[in-house]
Amino acid sequence: MLILEYKMDLKSSYLLIAFLSIQFTIAAAVSIPPLPTEGIQLYLSSDNSVLPDYSLLQESQLPLSQGLQGLWCQTSNSSQSINWYLPNGTLVPATNGTGLPVYSYSAPGQSGLLRTDLIGSYQGLYSCVISNGGNNDSSTLVAAVVRDTEYNSAVGPIVTGDLHFSLLSSVDSPQVSFSLSFNVTRRPPTNVTCSLNGTVIPVNGSDIHRRAIGSTLDNILIEVMVIIRIRQAGLYSCTVSNSRVDNVHVYPGAGNGRFISVTDPPSNVLVNRTGLTSFNVSWTPPPFLSAPLAGYQIFHLPISGANVMSGVNIVNNESQTVAIDDLIFNVTYQIFVVSVGGDIPSEQSNAILASTGVTFSITSHPPLIPYIGDTDITLTCTVALDVPMIVFQLVWLGPNDTVIHTNSVNMNQSGPDVSIQSIDLSLDLIDPATIGMYRCMANFSNDNVTASTDYELIGQAPDINVTVSIVYGDQSLIEGTYTDLLCTVSNIQGLASLTIVSWYYNGTEISNGTDYTLSQERRELLRINQLSVSRDNEGVYSCVVSVDTRYLIGGVGNDSVALAVQSFSSNDINIFISFSKPSLFLGDSFILQCSLTVPDRYIYQPTLFEARFLSFELPLTTPYLSGVSEEAIV
């Protein structure tokens, strides 16, 4: 840095110029690597490569005094926070000069592990923890950094001790999953491979879990857990290897194995119903045993009608039957049996679907939809049960939920065969009162259970005869008058209260308004408020009558009429003049009366009357007034 200080002393009138020079150093340009497009990763900038988790690096691959060359922990989400941790679990400092051989440099979405000195005693596993936001969840990436002298001479990772088996899935799960756990020493296990009887098992990367237990100067201890999802007995073994950033990419390591047994499944599972909500389940033991048999687990899982958990019954290996009680009525269950004893339980036996419900069916005799007015119709309710020795009551309820017929049933059967009971309901006449919803109900009073099914008795309504007529006749259809159309209905057999009348003009439904008035009491009467030549002579008026109920089909009729409206003219107005006296003499007073008539139902009233006296002829030669001319103007 160069500082120039300029001062002026007015008294001495000279300039004092002092130069202060300080030595400075320009650092190398900072280079931050780009972020990944998705996910998280370890990026080694000196090698321009992405490293797999638990890779092994030598310290020289983290160059000294080379800007920001180092091992970068990166995430595509730049809002996440990232921290590096030393092999001893303490946080890597974010500044240089702390006496440690490494420090971290943070930028949005990444943090670099940078080396400033020889690793020395800080050889081991370095962990990068990526926080996943506001929750407590996080992701961890791990890499081992060792001294250069240890890198090439070190052996690969070694599996120590036995493989530990743990069943992860529940016994009733159709898909099995278990874990094999083991410890790895010396070097980190970048690659983990498991096999069954010598054949490699495909394992997803997300099913391989590593956890650093600790590390010393010359040794690294890591616990590995592999999740496997196959149900097969045999010798399972796992091996590990180590990926390094040099020409020799993989260092093989030693492995270990364990035999895993699978229990054989039972067969011939049978389910017998012993009551409304109980079953007996029986089965045949496995024909041969490849693993010790400790017993069985019986599951009943509802698949409809109720949201309850599956039930479990555990019995010993000598039992071949079990009772399942206190189930939920009218629910279908999936029942299966599993053998247990080996490392992995058997597959589920063939599932049996068993229902605690009652099977109903209702038929009508004859089966065709009856017409209104038909007689002798029979509804038959059939109940099927596979429950021995049970007493219940069958009840018929009519359209108004009133009991109209009952029948007591006593089923006394010795075996599991299905027993069928029926109850008939006879209807003498089909009319609007007998069509509707019927219910057949079974009351199991001893079990406090009621079951029922419904039947819609649909009737066939006859065709409706409809006639549209002009109330006042065709001869009185004059423009400016109103008229009424009448829709007459016949052949409805007691359905008058269920019918609905609709009016249409050229296919468009008519409603109350300026042009039309529909009677609220009698919708079959339509008033055209003012006849019009241009409108009414160009259209057709239709009346449609239908039955308004969900339990009837058919029952529709219609008729239409076209109008012939005459134009209004002065010929449709009549004027009459009369005098108050039959004879008039000179000097008499009299009243002249002018009468005006218009067509019937004419909606306009005359607004102006004018009487005009024209002339007399004088002198009068007769006692009667003569030669008088009269005129009335409207």
Image: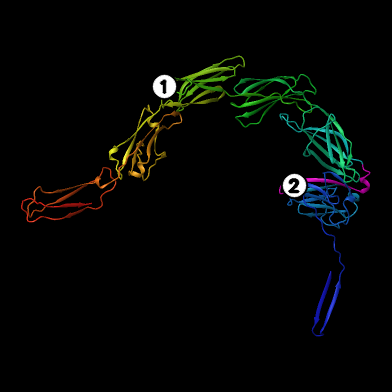
Q: Secondary structure at mark 2?
A: loop
Q: In the figure, 482 relative to 178: above or below?
A: below
- At 82% from the left and 49% from the top, the residue drawn is 43
Image position of 605 (left or right of 255): left
Q: What is the number of the mark on residue 457?
A: none
Q: Return the residue at label 1.
A: 374
Q: Quadrant of the N terminus?
A: bottom right
Q: Tag 1: Cα neighbours inside 10 Å, few (<14), some, or many (≥20)? A: some
Q: Nearer the viewer, residue 495 or 619?
A: 619
Hey, which quadrant is residue 247 in on the image?
top right
Q: Position of residue 538 (x, y in %)?
A: 37, 41
Q: In the figure, 173 relative to 614: above or below?
A: above
Q: In the figure, 231 relative to 142: above or below?
A: above
Q: Position of residue 155 (x, y in %)?
A: 92, 41
- Which residue appears farthest toward the top when viewing the image? 414
Q: Secondary structure at mark 1?
A: loop
Residue type at numbered disc 2: Glu
Q: Nearer the viewer, residue 605 or 125?
A: 605
Question: Is residue 532 in sight in this rendering?
Answer: no
Stretch in magenta: 133-154
Q: Return the residue at label 2.
A: 38
Asked whether residue 29 is drawn in magenta, I would say: no
Q: Position of residue 494 (x, y in %)?
A: 37, 27
Hey, which quadrant is residue 301 in on the image?
top right
Question: Is residue 228 in sight in this rendering?
Answer: yes
Hey, which quadrant is residue 351 in on the image?
top right
How far apart are the two marked residues, 1 and 2, measured between alpha carbons? 76 Å
Q: In the figure, 612 relative to 136: above or below?
A: below
In primary-sequence order, the first of circles 1 and 2 is 2
Residue type at numbered disc 1: Asp
Q: Position of residue 2 (x, y in %)?
A: 84, 71
